[in-house]
Amino acid sequence: LKDENLVPLSPDEYEEMQNDVEQEELKVEEEAKAIHTRATGEKMRWFDDASVGPIEKGPGDEGNEFDVLMVDETDGMVAAEKIVDVLKEQGVCLCEANAPHELLGAAFDEAEALWEAGFFGPPMKVCDEDGQTEAQVWKDVLYQDEHKVLWINPEGQDPRFSGRMKALTSLSENMLEFCRGLGEPLERKTGIFFTHLWNAMLSCYTGDKVYGCHLDNPHSCGSAGSQLPDNGLRLTLVYYLNVHWNPTSDYNGGGMDVFLTDPGSAPASATAARRSKRVRVAPHADALAIFLSERMAHQVIPTKGKDKWFCLTMWCFEQEAMADFLPKIFEMRQKQLESQYGAEQEESDSDLD
């Protein structure tokens, strides 16, 4: 541009331009939200203030009450069988993973430094309107509480993170290997199988916040007419890094409650899940919570104050089902729009009569 073509904006003109930009952004967001189905509305009711069931098992003065202690397991295959047996019986298994304390301390320090440096961001990158729509779907289903995260990608790490996440990467690779060892016994004993793994997602829970209860894959929850399609998620692993957690403080913010409904199927409703007994997981370093993504409702425990609570989350999924998820969402939305249009047309014709 030439200098003579540059015309300064008055304050009123600048404000009007900013309002136009904001309105356009809101329009894109509203269009993205239009994909919401009745199932999405059903999912949103997981946030209702229904009475919550009692804690059946939780941390004591010595920390979490574990189902499996990996320090006692000399055979990885035998340990995997034990973990799957617990998953089959109660839908969630709490393990002490036996990572070196020095590694956990280094991972926490890396996570805190990355958070303070501002490297955490939205779970999904949005480059266009389609990306906004996809991000909105996954936010409603999976990322309700994950506003800022950091993905740990050992094979394609961002150059900005070079040397900044060695311990986090090491723990992430250990989780990947751990997941692979669960695949065969999980399918054999429960009929649940997965084909792929996501990289670990690093989350931070902090501030005065309350978090929502949800299923990672709610496709079988609720009435038939209100169900979301299968998003492919089968198994969820959450690994805590917080070496500063104090078992005598009676504070478990940033940890997790898992609702003990029937592990053989999804809960009948949000109310049924929330009224069930709970397993409470404190956010202590080296605690690994494993649960069935389609069947076990869970909720991050409310946080208070400025302390930061970090965890790594990894999902095991079935690729074919996940590939069909978004197309089925859009198909459901299209059918709803057609049904709505038909109903409006009938009402209009009736008025003419």
Image: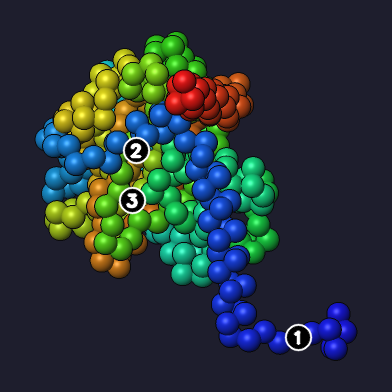
Measured in 3D between alpha carbons, the distance from the residue under mark 1 to the one under mark 3, in whole angstroms, is: 58 Å
- Position of 282 with respect to 126 (left or right) is left
**Residue 142 position in % (x across, y down):** 44, 39
User: Left or right: 120 with respect to 221?
Assistant: right
Q: Are marks 1 and 2 in contact (CB under 8 Å)?
A: no
Label at residue 7? 1
Which numbered disc, 1 or 3, marks the residue closer to the eye? 1
Q: Nearer the viewer, mark 1 or mark 2?
A: 1
Residue 285, numbered label: 3
User: Does residue 298 appear anywhere in the picture?
Assistant: no
First along the sequence among labels 2 and 3: 2
Closer to the camera in the image, 252 or 326: 326
Sooner in the amino-acid sequence: mark 1 or mark 2? 1
Q: Is residue 152 above or below residue 78?
A: below
Q: Secondary structure at mark 1?
A: loop
- Picture coordinates of residue 53, whole percent (x, y): 14, 34
Residue beneath the point at 60% across and 65% down? 21
Badge 1 amino acid:
Val
Residue sitting at 17 percent across and 28 percent down?
Answer: 276
Q: Mark number for residue 44?
A: 2
Secondary structure, mark 3, is loop
The image shows residue 296, relative to residue 239, as above or below, that is above
Residue at 27 percent of width and 52 percent of height: 210
